[in-house]
Each structure stands twice: as structure tokens, then as C-alpha cells.
Amino acid sequence: MIAIGSRTQVYPVLLPGAREETHYRTRRAKRRPEIRFLILLAILLLPALFYVSGHVEMARTGYQISRLREEVALLQRENERLRAKVASLSDPERIAWIATNQLGMIFPAANQVAVVEVPVPLASQAKPVAVRAPTWWEQVQAWFLHPEAQASEP
């Protein structure tokens, strides 16, 4: 005779207070390894990205400084050229030559020159100004805003 053993099936039962969350977390982590990979990739690439962006910004600033130096040199050359032109155009001999030859002007004779004395108006004469003592608020402001002036006073 053949004996048949008893068949039993086991069904998982969750008891209250059992470790439901850890089981869920481990299953979730096993199902999503790409999330771990993306987090690791971000952790590795972000510092490199900041490093490269800093160097790119330094290079851009260096090029900008170089361009501005060239522009300053160009403007200095132009300024020197314009100063030389002003000096040549304001030469008194040149102005006298243009006045006599091109404009037909002549130097005045001795009897054509008259000296006129103009009295100084009273408004332009210096008036004495009364010096007033500073207020206590002005002294406090001077003490806080200008401490180097206080050091020289006895």
C-alpha cells in the first residue's frame, strides 16, 4: 500500500506589531535600484559640475578683463592723439597766422589800445564770517564719523 502524506500549505499572515515597514522597504529597494544609481550619480556629478562651472566663469572673466584692457589701451592711444591735436591747434603762433593771413586781421597800433580800470564791486569783496561753535549733536557726529580729526586735537 502506498501512503500519502498530508499536504499543508503555508499562508503568510501579518501579525499586529510585526515588522511590516522593513519588509516593505527592502522589497521597494530591491524593485528600484535605478533610484539608488541616480542618487549616487547626482552625488558624484554635482561637485564636478560646480568645479567646472567655476572654471568656466573664471575663464569668461579673464577674457572680459583682457578685452577691457585692450579697449583701455585703444582709448589711451586715442586720448594721446587728441591731446597732441589740441596742443597743435591751440598754438599761439598758429592762431596768429590764421588771424592775419586767412581772416585779414592786423595787430592794433599803440594809439588804438586803451586800458580801462574797472572798480571791484562790493559784493565780490570778502566779508568776515562769524564762526559759531558746533552743537552737541555735531560734536557727536564728528566724533563718530571723523575719529582721525580727534587724534590731532590736544
Image (cartoon, rainbow, N blue to C red):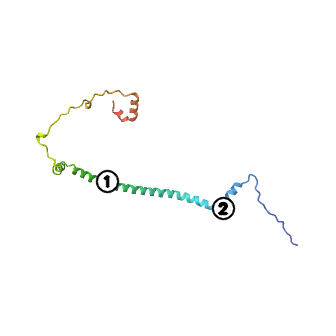
- In-front residue for pair 128/41: 128
Q: Which mark sits nearer the N-terminus, 1 or 2?
A: 2
41 is higher (above) or lower (below) than 129: below
Position of residue 16 in the picture relative to residue 120 (left or right): right
Residue 75 appears at what percent x and percent y? 31, 53
Report how far apart the C-alphas of labels 1 and 2 lie in the structure: 67 Å
Q: Quadrant of the C terminus?
A: top left
Q: Which residue is mark 1?
A: 75
110 is higher (above) or lower (below) than 127: below
Q: Which mark is residue 153?
A: none
Quarter of the view holding residue 132: top left
Q: Which residue is mark 2?
A: 31
Q: Quadrant of the N terminus?
A: bottom right
Looking at this view, name the residue that lies furthest to the bottom.
1
Tell me the mark number nearer the camera, choosing from 1 and 2.
1
Position of residue 78 in the picture relative to residue 56 (left or right): left
Residue 145 appears at what percent x and percent y? 39, 35
- In-front residue for pair 56/81: 81
Q: Amino acid at mark 1?
A: Leu
